[in-house]
Structures are given as structure tokens and as C-alpha cells.
């Protein structure tokens, strides 16, 4: 299975080493957010990796909703559990019972990895474009930005609905985005669609929360983008 290099299961617990998490972020999601670097002081496991593991283990449903309650730090053994029944919420918790991710599900389901793998790859690649592709125009338009030394961009939630679980391998495209600013905090909504032969077969939204906002500085933003471009180029040379 293509996710095997990015986690290990020990005594019924899912363990994701920082190196595994960082490798997933860079090679599958194209996400070079420094918070996913293995040596980062505030390291956290990419939320998209947790979602990928959930749908691989439990199947992909026509409708799913993700709610992130907290970030998973380094060396945190995780328990994936469903309350009861095929459509009950799935929770990702630690051994003390702290919930990091809650996933709701409804409708038909597929366990076909030939559909699930392209779904995962396309969604996380879309997700990895958050900055600068989708966020920069919004920040520039609103005249705000996050702290480049400590970017607080939190993956809050995601919801999607497919016409059928069999449409999971359809093309995923960006639709539109919006941002609401309140003081030093902002909420960003990214909307996307699945299309097949020109027809829309699914849609979804992703919500990000930005904190510690300050006035927009084009020089600082461009420096961040140049740093990301260098990191991507270095990764491609490996």
C-alpha cells in the first residue's frame, strides 16, 4: 500500500515518526510548511496524512466531514476508533483519550484502493497548494499576513460530497476562495469540485484559521515564497 512508508503500527497503535510525516508532506502533498519539518520545534503531523489513513482503513464514503480538534505532535501513539455502526463518527485519539480528529461519514462506500489512492493523491496535492497559490491573493487583497517567523495557519475542517463513491478518482479542481478577517484572526474558505468528462460530480470546502495577523508586507511574503521554492527544488534534486 502506498501509505506504508509513512506510518507504522505497533501493538494496535498508529505511530508516525517526524521523518515519516515530513516525507509525506513533501513528496505526496507538496507541502513545505516548516511545521512539518522533522526537526521543527513545533512539529506536527500533517492533517492530510491522518485523513489518508482513515479512508484507507475504513473506506471512502460519498460524504465525509473532518473536524480537527488539536495538532498531533511527535511520537504520539494514536488510536483509530469508531463509536459503533458503519456510519458512526471515526475518532483519532491518543492513549489518554484526547481527540485530534473526528470524521463523520454518510452514503455509499468504496474500499477499492484503485479509487482511494488517486482520491488521496489529488486531494492532498490540492491541499498542499494552500500557500502561496490560494492564500497569497487573499492576503494581498485584505492587506494582512501571518507572521513569517511563526506562521499560524491551522487546518480546521473539511467537508465534501460526491455523487457516488465510484467518482472518487475524478479530477479535483479549485473553484473559489474567500477570507473573513476579524482583528488579528481570519477564517479562509477554499471551495473545490470533482469533475468527470466536464460534469461536476462532487464538491467540498476546506476551512483554515489564520492567527497573529499583521499588515501585509510584499517583501516578507516574497521572501517566504522564495524559501519555499528553494526547498521544493532541493527536494526534486534528491
Image (tube, helix red, strand yellow):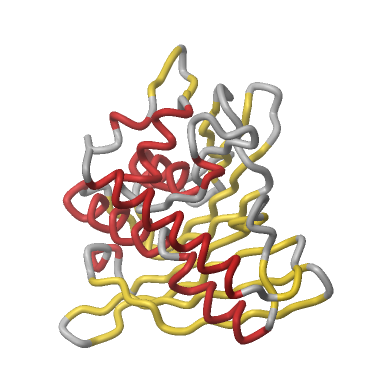
- Count of numbered circles on the image: 0
Task: Give the percent coordinates (x, y) of residue 126.
Answer: 37, 64
Give above or below for 150 relative to 221. above
Q: Residue at x 38, y 47 (%)?
A: 55
Q: Residue at x 27, y 63 (%)?
A: 168
Residue 171 sits in quarter: bottom left
Q: Residue at x 56, y 22 (%)?
A: 75
Task: Give the percent coordinates (x, y) of residue 101.
Answer: 59, 45
User: In the displayed image of the protein, which residue is found farthest to the top?
Assistant: 11
**Foreground pick, 106 / 52:** 52
Give above or below for 101 relative to 187. above
User: In the displayed image of the protein, which residue is found farthest to the right?
Assistant: 183
Residue 169 sits in quarter: bottom left
On-image quarter of the C terminus: top left
**Foreground pick, 161 / 215:** 215
Q: Residue at x 22, y 35 (%)?
A: 1
Q: Is residue 85 rendered to the left or right of residue 175?
A: right
Task: Give the percent coordinates (x, y) of residue 149.
Answer: 66, 51
Q: Is residue 167 rendered to the left or right of residue 10?
A: left
Q: Is residue 61 rendered to the left or right of residue 184?
A: left
Task: Give the percent coordinates (x, y) of residue 236.
Answer: 24, 47
Amino acid at each position: 500500500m502506498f501509505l506504508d512508508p509513512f506510518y507504522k503500527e505497533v501493538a494496535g497503535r498508529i505511530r508516525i515518526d517526524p521523518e515519516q510525516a515530513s516525507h509525506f508532506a513533501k513528496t505526496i502533498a507538496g507541502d513545505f510548511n516548516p511545521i512539518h519539518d522533522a526537526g521543527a520545534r513545533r512539529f506536527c503531523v500533517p492533517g492530510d496524512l491522518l485523513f489518508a489513513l482513515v479512508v484507507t482503513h475504513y473506506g471512502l464514503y460519498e460524504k465525509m466531514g473532518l473536524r480537527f480538534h488539536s495538532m498531533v505532535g511527535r511520537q504520539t501513539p494514536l488510536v483509530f476508533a469508531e463509536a459503533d455502526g458503519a456510519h458512526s463518527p471515526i475518532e483519532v485519539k491518543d492513549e489518554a483519550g484526547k481527540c485530534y480528529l473526528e470524521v463523520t461519514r454518510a452514503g455509499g462506500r468504496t474500499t477499492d484502493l484503485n479509487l482511494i489512492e488517486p482520491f488521496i493523491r489529488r486531494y492532498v496535492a490540492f491541499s498542499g497548494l494552500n500557500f502561496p497559490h490560494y492564500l497569497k491573493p487573499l492576503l494581498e487583497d485584505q492587506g494582512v499576513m501571518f507572521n513569517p517567523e511563526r506562521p499560524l495557519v491551522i487546518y480546521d475542517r473539511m467537508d465534501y460530497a460526491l455523487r457516488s463513491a465510484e467518482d472518487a478518482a475524478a479530477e479535483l479542481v479549485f473553484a473559489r476562495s474567500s477570507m473573513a478577517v476579524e482583528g488579528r484572526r481570519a477564517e479562509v474558505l477554499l471551495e473545490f469540485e470533482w469533475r468527470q468528462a466536464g460534469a461536476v460530480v462532487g464538491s467540498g470546502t476546506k476551512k483554515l484559521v489564520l492567527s497573529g495577523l499583521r499588515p501585509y508586507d510584499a517583501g516578507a511574503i516574497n521572501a517566504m515564497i522564495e524559501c519555499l521554492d528553494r526547498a521544493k527544488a532541493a527536494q526534486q534534486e534528491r
